[in-house]
Amino acid sequence: MSILVYTENWDGKFKKLSFELVSYASEIAKKMNTSAIALSIGKVEESELQKLGNYGAEKIISVSDEKNKVLDNQAFSKIIAEVANKENSEIIVFAHNNSGKALAPRVSVKLHAGLVSGVIALPSDFDTFTVSKKAFTGKAIANVVIKSPKKVLTLSQNSFGLIETENNSIIENFEPELSDTDFTTELKEVNKITGKVILTDAEIVISGGRGMKSSENWAPIEELAELLGAATACSRPVSDENWRPHSEHVGQTGKIIAPNLYFALGISGAIQHLGGVSSSKYIVAINTDHEAPIFESADYGIVGDVHKLIPELISEIKELKETEN
Amino acid sequence: MKILICISNVPDTTTKIKFTGDSTEFDVAGVQWIINPWDELALTRALELKEKTNGKIEKISVVSVGLKTAEPTLRKALAIGADEAFRIDCEAKDSNSVAAQIAEVAKDYDIIMCGIEASDYNGSAVGGMLSEFLNIPSVSSVSNLDIENNDILISREIDGGAEILTTKIPFVAIVQKGIAIEPRIPSMRGIMMARKKPLNVVSPIEVENLTEFVSFELPPSKAACKMIDAENVKELVDLLHNEAKVI
Amino acid sequence: MNFNFTEEQEMIRQAARDYAERELIKDVLERDEKAEYPTQHIKNLSELGFLGMLVDPKYDGGGMDTVSYVLAMEEICKIDSSVGVIISVNNSLVCYGIENYGTEEQKEKYLKPLARGEKIGAFLLSEPEAGSDATHQRTTAEDKGDHYLLNGTKNWITNANSGSIYIVVAQTHPEKKHKGINVFIVEKDSPGISLGQHEDKMGMRSSDTHSVMFTDVKVPKENRIGEDGFGFKFAMKTLEGGRIGIASQALGIASGAFERSVNYAKERKAFGTELANHQAIAFKISDMAVKIEAARNFCLKAAWLKDQGKPFGVASAMAKQYAADIAMEVTTDAVQIHGGYGYVKEYHVERLMREAKLTQIYEGTSEIQKIVISRSILKG
């Protein structure tokens, strides 16, 4: 028996969320008296693979075929299921991100395993195998029982944290049985914005709403984001008006994020918006309307004009940074 | 080419979420049901493609797993412009069984579109499972889908950008924000035409549920917001630095 | 008795609500401020079929029933009753009149583009010295053999500028009094028609209202609706249906103000607790709800009678009078609940209050409705 965790890489590197996943899988393994095995697909250096051991992976299986550079749902899910069978994995853990959402359902069908996506904690009961997850876009928490012998979970980002352990890991290379017909999607083009903090990775997110008044007013938000190493985001009306790209829209129908700190600037905080950001550790709200619902969900609030307050915020943070240095 | 859109019937996004039966069941009393927002955008995109490709798409169908209460939602999809609807006559309880049910209808289609998740149970699962049951390609996080000549062009969102991919029909596209700008509002003509379009009720197949929602809780309520005077931005920065320790 | 709406009626209500909440809300304040006509909205709503929703599909209409119409009007007028009145005049006065009393040729030529919303209609009855009093028409239509010659002035005409097809009521045989009145379909670009200036109204400022002057305007004989002398009856019959439109509009204004008040009362705190927890406010909310529910039932009953082919003139008069009067009361209370915020434009309720006032005045004042109702009771 084992717990298998699929750790995606980004140009050969892992991220904090990869380590969070391994930490989570290792904790489950501990409770079930078994071991956690990490699976990496694509070219990753051994020194990078080793890092997964710091979070409790006892074995790291690497499928480093060049063919697996781009996510192909059919090929990848086939590899993962093959490894899960080989390792007799009872539980397979994915991240609740783009690739996890793409692969976990396919793998669950291959293994005839019940899937719970977006789990937010360790199973509350291992006998019935009950896990909790957010439902109704953050408006409720659901407890779900998985009845099948094998189980697939996707873990919500930043819901568990990191647990470092002694590294006793071994790395094993594996060559899955794949033929060209297993690859069914072909990459034509990649468009990547470089040099910007990625929204779903960001520890701090600076988000603007309709109160920003127009796309021309985004410079202070960008400046604040750069100062704090933060990502920029926006509310739905802003992306609907094309002031900002759709990829920046956070909320129920956009991206669901869980940073440490979320700045809601000129965002009134409609229930649909809150659904996307309520898992943030701290929320700061600035709004001219003292009755804006965002203040109900915020930790710190200022009633005032964003256009005046963001520049002040920038200079105060600059001052803080100078005194720190 | 034939397109199938998988539709979930979900509570309106502004619904106040409550539970009954000792917190074991979602309280549907007074709930306004809508088409799951992403599914509605998928349908919008399918209609755009049908208009744009001039006869290449012969049919757009919609399917939903649910009891009779799901019919208004399907009827609305027909009024918006779908040609045919299927309702698989059982309760949608578990992603795996929903996908297995839909697979029975979906096998006759070339492009199958599913929303990235349903806004009630946030499963993000049915599309992927369906593609596996059908053993066909799937592409997730799809923010654009186009048909040019005979090529399928898909834009898939990745962290910090997008990939342009191509695949062969039949396939499942799991779509998200960006696939279409805004859902359509049914016109009087559409509503009238929907009267005559088929809404087929399909008997469910035998399939087991692998998961079960056993209970619900409301998230813990947040402590009151600490209000800071607009003249004192410095205090906010101090609090973030010293109290929250996030900057 | 069956109080259930059909799936289709619900769908129409939702479609109207979606359009109002998604689109009309965006610029309703600005259009009110600038008294700007909602050109793009009317185009969009035409494409959705609202401008001719009651017309038979064979004349390019939506073929919907009057109950659906009430639901749609309520939803649209919760947000924007300027748009509501444009739809109401086109549907329940102009299209209704031509569809029910016009010839096939008239329907082909005029009803179809009106039902598609490509052309907008206006109903020209009121005169400077006779509001909605159809018996004392000073505008004349002189019979010239193959045509009529129109002379006179019409006042308070909704869609006068935006519309291009006029329904004009005029006197042909003054000696026969109201039995000498005729009604005509007149194209606005006919020589001899000129518009007075845009009326600077208190409310419904986004709909265009003008006076219209006729100087020797030639109208072909085939543009007369009905037999010679049918005009008065035509006006009375058409206004019966029009009243359902305005009643639903008043209902929408009231329920729009009500919804905003409820939200406000639940959010806003005073004396340490939400407004809603003060009985003075809670009872106001209760009174508003009761009035609105009664008005809604009046509107739906009148619509149902019309859909059943039963007489609905008195029911629509009751609906119009009651809904308009309670719209005024409810919006006044809504402003009161909002306090200072209610008196500024951003919160919408002052605008709804200004709009409510007009529903007590046009298409028959509340007093006129009382005449209609009382006569129906006392005449026998």
Image: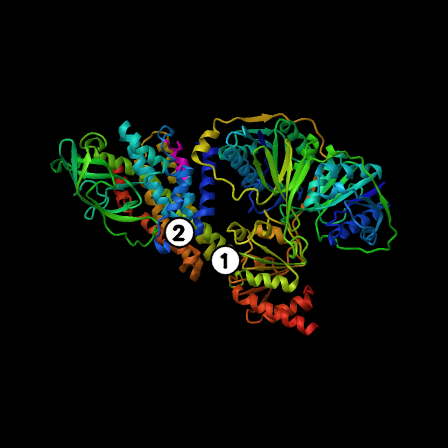
What is the basis of the colouring in this image? rainbow
Residue nearer the viewer, C139 or B48: B48
Image quadrant in which the C terminus of chain A is located: bottom right
A99 versus B69 height, above or below: below
Q: Which residue is mark 2?
A: C330
Q: Residue C172 location in percent, x, y? A: 15, 36
Q: Nearer the viewer, residue C376 or C118?
A: C118
Report if residue C319 is visible in the image: no
Work out whether residue B156 or residue C282 is closer to the camera in this orientation and state it. Answer: B156
Name the residue located 75 percent from the left edge and 42 percent from the top edge. A68
Residues packed near mark 2 inside 10 Å, few (<14), some (14 to 19) or many (20 plus): many
Callout 2–callout 1 Cβ contact below 8 Å:
no
Q: Is residue A160 left or right of residue C317?
A: right
Q: Residues within 10 Å of mark 1 (few under 14, many from 20)?
A: some
In which quadrant of the rendered image does the N terminus of chain A lie? top right
Picture quadrant of residue A82:
top right
Assign a secondary structure to mark 2.
helix
Residue pictured at 59% horizontal, 36% vertical: B7
In the rendered image of this protein, does residue A291 appear above or below residue C324? below
Which of the numbered marks, if any, corresponds to residue A214?
1
Q: Where is residue C318 shown, x and y percent of the image?
A: 33, 41
Q: Chain of mark 2?
A: C
Q: Amino acid at mark 2?
A: Val
Task: Reply yes or no: does residue C190 show up in magenta.
Answer: no
Nearest to the observer: residue A135 or residue C143: C143
Which segment did they paint magenta? C60-70
For the question of whether residue C357 can be seen, the reply is: yes
Query: Residue B118: x percent and y percent?
Result: 62, 41
Q: Badge 1 sits on which subunit? A: A
Reply above or below: B170 against A132.
Answer: above
Residue sticking out furthest to the bottom: A323
Mark 1 element type? loop
